[in-house]
Image (cartoon, grey):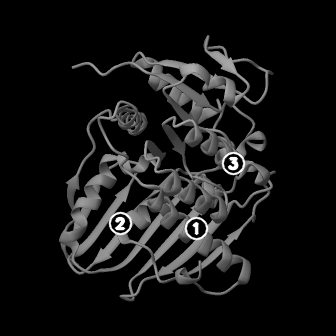
Amino acid sequence: MRERLVKLLVIGYGSIGRKHAANARATGHEVALLRHSKENPNQDGLREYYSLEEAVANGKTDGAIICSPTSRHLPDVELLVERRIPFLLEKPPAAEMESTLQMEKLLLQSGFGEYAIGFNLRYYPALLFIKDFLPQLGKVYSARIAAGYYLPNWRRDVDYRETSSAKKELGGGVHIELVHEIDYLVWFFGCPEKVSGYINHVSDLEISTADICAALLRYRDDSVVELHLDYLSHRYLRGCQIVAENGTLEWEMNGGSVYHTERAGRASEEVFSPTPGYDFNETYVEELKDFIGIIQGRTESRMEMSDCVKTMRVLEAIRLSSEKEEWVSLGDI
């Protein structure tokens, strides 16, 4: 049975907003935009609104996709929950821990559960495979998770200095932009006991945000995770290594395969290989399918706001540790 087509409002039309709009239109859904400025109207023939109240009035919208700068997420969520309109919220939910907790409280008190969170790496086949493979590794001793790319090359069609990634007032910063890595870290291993972190702007990039984040996360069983995020790597960097009782697991997005080395001296075995021609956009397509299912009452959210809170607690612990130059316990967040 073909899914019922819906009317979607895309809030914010930057790179991620354009991606969601294109994916929705490709499957026949109707898309309108909420813009904060009438300058440079879209070239895609989409209807534009400049007030969220107007955009959601009188049944104009079945669901909203929030792609605005992180600092603007909370007011949009508040109105959508009040009007009982399902939403897909791009990561992270908010730039500060306090706003994330406000969202969680709002959703709990309202009883509203028709939402999805845009951590699309949870749809990435290699990471889904690793999540399922983890029990076979036995006790995890350590892990390294890294992501980085040179910010001026990130979105080649725009001036990097004008993006939300570069502006502190819009909720930018490498630790926020690449919070996907913190999310899948928590998804894989849970929350650590304590964190030591370093967040800073160390390069000559013309930005008001941090361009590097490094952290050490210690768990109650004495296992440790090392995290590295940056806007500086001239070669695209994204991957992880997990060292455990029953071998070492390694994945790098360049190439996409997952390798397992059972013990020292043995050759690595390719235990997962990506589908030839796999397009990373498929993670967004699958995410959108789930969201449409939520709108139509066919599926439930893959990720609750409580999961977001865990991710944001780790992020906040890293930030506080960097600020205080000391270890921070997650129990204090």
Tell us which disc is closer to us: 3 or 1.
1
- Front in this rendered view, residue 56 or 213: 56
| Residue plotted at (72% across, 83% down) | 324
Q: Position of residue 232 (x, y in %)?
A: 65, 56
Q: The disc labelled 2 sits on which kind of residue? A: Phe
Above-or-below relation of 99 to 139 = above
Q: Residues within 10 Å of mark 3 (few under 14, many from 20)?
A: many
| Alpha carbons under labels 1 and 2: distance apart | 16 Å
Q: Position of residue 148 (x, y in %)?
A: 56, 56
Residue with the mark numbered 2: 188
Residue with the mark numbered 3: 165
SS at badge 2:
helix
Reading the chain from its start, which is encountered first: label 3 or label 1?
3
Residue with the mark numbered 1: 315
Q: The disc labelled 3 sits on which kind of residue? A: Ser
Quarter assignment of residue 276: top left
Q: The disc labelled 1 sits on which kind of residue? A: Leu
Reading the chain from its start, which is encountered first: label 2 or label 3?
3
| Alpha carbons under labels 2 and 3: distance apart | 26 Å
| Residue plotted at (48% across, 56% down) | 305
Q: Is residue 34 left or right of residue 278?
A: right
- Front in this rendered view, residue 227 or 285: 285
Reading the chain from its start, which is encountered first: label 1 or label 2?
2
